Image (cartoon, rainbow, N blue to C red):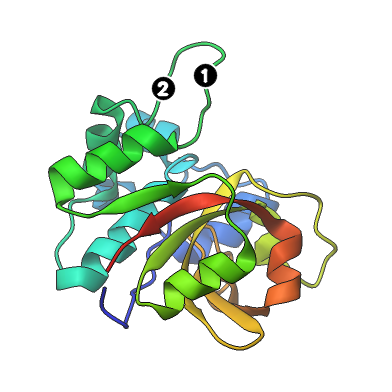
């Protein structure tokens, strides 16, 4: 993987993220929605709330060689492999194992599901040159507040130093939360100890 990883958000207009997340603005009230590749506003609204994983993937693909399909194309492609489901009772978010199959088959990207991922193991993988899509609570974007839980959202871990973890957050509501560095101990309070390791 390239060392320089661009920031990609799940919002067509990142500057509207705070209003959408905390100000009551509708996801579909985004004038740049078509830039995500969605064919219509309804499709954009249905996908934008759930494609944090696709934003992470797009960052990884762009870091690799500067080329990536749109967020919508990635989501539809992943769904064909079973990585998303609209069936009643099925997870709304990314389903890891078929997602890994999709990565290998369609993007020549070797990846592994990490169902019991510790912070040290994740950091070791990142230091070896891998990227990690990690499951965290979405409120990791406001780390000055106490964590309300773990999981439910995906971020791309890009670097790990002695006691800090750097990551790109597709739902970051401000520039410093889109590309963030936190103490490992703080990150762990949001971390669900699972994810997908994207191998270099």
The relative height of residue 40 versus residue 123 in the rendered view (above or below) is above
Residue at 16%, 71% (x, y): give it: 66
For residue 10, say whether it is visible. Answer: no
| Mark 2: secondary structure | loop
Mark 1 and mark 2 in contact? Answer it, CB < 8 Å.
yes
Seen at 28% across and 35% down, the residue is 78
Residue at horizontal 55 percent and vertical 66 percent from the top: 121
How many C-alpha atoms fall within 10 Å of the one at disc 1: few (<14), some, or many (≥20)? Answer: few
Q: Which mark is residue 90?
A: 1
Element at badge 1? loop
In-image side of 23 versus 160 (left or right): right
- View extreme (bottom): residue: 162
Q: Residue 83's image quarter? A: top left
Q: Is residue 115 left or right of residue 108?
A: right
> In the rendered structure, which disc, 1 or 2, sits on the residue that comes first in sequence?
2
What percent of the width, then of the height, locates residue 23?
Answer: 68, 53
Residue 60, image x and y in percent? 30, 64
**Which of the numbered marks, if any, corresponds to residue 85?**
2
In this orientation, does residue 107 appear? yes
Q: Position of residue 14 (x, y in %)?
A: 46, 63
């Amino acid at each position: 993987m390239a060392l320089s990883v661009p920031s990609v958000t799940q919002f067509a207009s990142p500057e509207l993220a705070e209003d959408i997340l905390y100000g009551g603005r509708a996801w579909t009230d985004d004038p740049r929605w078509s830039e995500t590749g969605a064919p219509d506003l309804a499709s954009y609204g249905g996908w934008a709330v759930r494609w944090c994983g696709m934003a992470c993937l797009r960052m990884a693909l762009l870091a690799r060689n500067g080329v990536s399909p749109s967020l919508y194309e990635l989501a539809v492609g992943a769904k064909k492999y079973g990585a998303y489901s609209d069936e009643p009772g099925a997870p709304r978010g990314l389903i890891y194992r078929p997602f890994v199959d999709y990565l290998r088959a369609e993007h020549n990207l070797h990846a592994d599901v990490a169902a019991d991922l510790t912070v040290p193991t994740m950091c070791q993988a990142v230091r070896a040159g891998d990227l990690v899509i990690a499951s965290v609570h979405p409120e990791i974007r406001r780390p000055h507040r106490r964590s309300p839980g773990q999981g439910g959202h995906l971020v791309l871990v890009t670097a790990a130093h002695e006691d800090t973890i750097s990551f790109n957050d597709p739902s970051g509501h401000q520039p410093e939360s889109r590309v963030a560095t936190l103490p490992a101990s703080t990150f762990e309070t949001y971390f669900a100890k699972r994810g997908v390791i994207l191998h270099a």
